[in-house]
Each structure stands twice: as C-alpha cells, then as structure tokens.
Image (cartoon, rainbow, N blue to C red):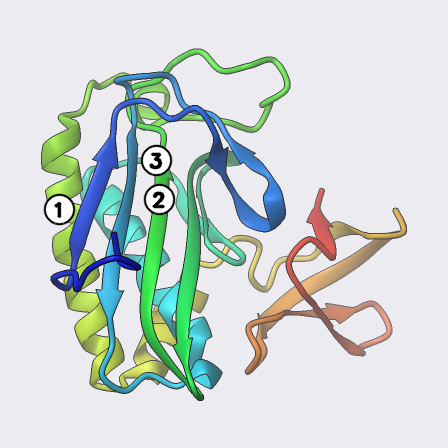
Amino acid sequence: MAADSALENFTVVATDTQRKGRGQQGSSWESEPFKNLIFSVFVSFESFAISAQKYLSFAVSLAIFEVLREEKIPDISIKWPNDILSGKKKIGGILIENRLKGKQISSAIIGVGLNVNQTIFSSNLKNAGSMKLRTNRTFERDLLLEKIILKLKMNVAALNAKNFEALEASYLAVLYKKNIPAMFKDRKDVLFMGIIHGISKEGKLQVMLADDTLKEFGIKEIIFL
C-alpha cells in the first residue's frame, strides 16, 4: 500500500490469520487464528535521522510495554532489542522496516505480533507465552489495539520532539537483565558471564564482561541463557 499510494500517517493493517509471519533476521512468527494481535502501522517522519533509529525501536517497544503494564500483565520487561516478555515468556515481537531518503528515515512500517488469548503453542516454542496465560483473563483485541496505537502516537510525538534521552531512560529502566549478572552465548557457542550495561549509539547491546571490558553485540550475535 505504501509503495502504491500516499498513506495517511498511522494507517493500520491488522489480520486475524497469518500464514508466513516474519521476525528478526528471517525468523518466523506463529499465531493461532483469531486469538492474537497481528498488525502493521505506517508511520511517516518529516525529519528523523538514520543515526537516531534506535530511538524508534525504543518508542515502539515502550508503547506496547506501557499498555501491558496498565493491563496488569505481571513482570513485564523489554528484551533487547524489542521483544516483550512477561517473566521469561515471550508474548510480543516487533519488526520495523524503514524507508530511507538520503540520511533520513522518511517512513517506517512497524510490524507487531502480540500473543493475547492463545493458550496452546507448538512444542518447539518453549519460551512462548500470552497475556491470557499470564493472567487467566480473556482480552478484547480491538480495544487493546486502540490503546497501543494511542501510546504509539504519543511516543512518536516524543521522537519528533527529539526527546531521545527520556525515551532511552525509560527503555533502560525496563530492559530485561539490565545490571544483573547473567550467562550469555555468542555465535561460536562460547558461554560467558556478563552484565548488560546499555545500548550503543548504533543500537547494539553493550555487555560488561568479567574482565571489565565493554563489548557490543548486534542482533543474533548473542543469546540470553
């Protein structure tokens, strides 16, 4: 739609059934029909530098986090870069695809998968959870979507106002395993201990190692154990 016509800002496309859901770096996203929220949002920008794209990820993940916190979902956190966790269970995933113009992001398609009322998952999805499993409540999906879009609009307004420090502070405050010694594994299957320190300017995860060196990791370069 965005390629063929001029879309109104915050145009939303949602579906009840998805056959080929995509996640980060080619991973898949599975969803039981008519149980969850699966939607994409078109957002355009007048002046938003590519160098600031990590703040868009912060704004989107915080929008979902804030709604779920209001819905009393227990132990909510954001797992870098933008997975939504309840305890150790993943209940939401985000995929952002940017359209570039020079050194600016002219628009973005924000794809969201949120496990709402699904209670049975494939045996290979051991870390999958849902809002219903965590609360034993059934949620109205349309109302939930409206709340998320409202929060997203507020956070994008903060982006446009260049309130980057506030967005980053809010994100780091709810980042999974932040400042907690944890075990990780790298691409070579090497295990190591570290403490999440922050997010680099390029959006990479900064981990303080046992020898007090700070190492940065990109998406799929590190696994949380």
Q: How many marks?
A: 3
Label disc, if present, on residue 147 of the rendered structure:
1
- Calculate the distance from the C-alpha at mark 3 to the C-alpha at mark 2: 6 Å
Q: Amino acid at mark 2?
A: Val
- Identify the mark nearer the N-term, 2 or 1: 2
Label disc, if present, on residue 179 of the rendered structure:
none
Q: Residue 92, percent across and down?
A: 40, 39
Rate crowding at label 3 as few (under 14), some (14 to 19) or many (20 or more) other CA atoms within 10 Å: many
Q: Foreground residue, 2 or 112?
A: 2
CB-based contact (under 8 Å), mark 3 and mark 2: yes
Label disc, if present, on residue 112 of the rendered structure:
2
Secondary structure found at label 3:
strand
Rate crowding at label 2 as few (under 14), some (14 to 19) or many (20 or more) other CA atoms within 10 Å: many
- Identify the mark nearer the N-term, 1 or 3: 3
Q: Amino acid at mark 1?
A: Lys
Secondary structure found at label 2:
strand
Question: Up-down: is 138 above or below 167?
Answer: above
Q: Amino acid at mark 3?
A: Leu
What residue appears at the point 58 percent right and 23 percent down from the top-left corner?
125
Image quarter for residue 57? bottom left
Q: Residue 104, percent across and down?
A: 38, 84
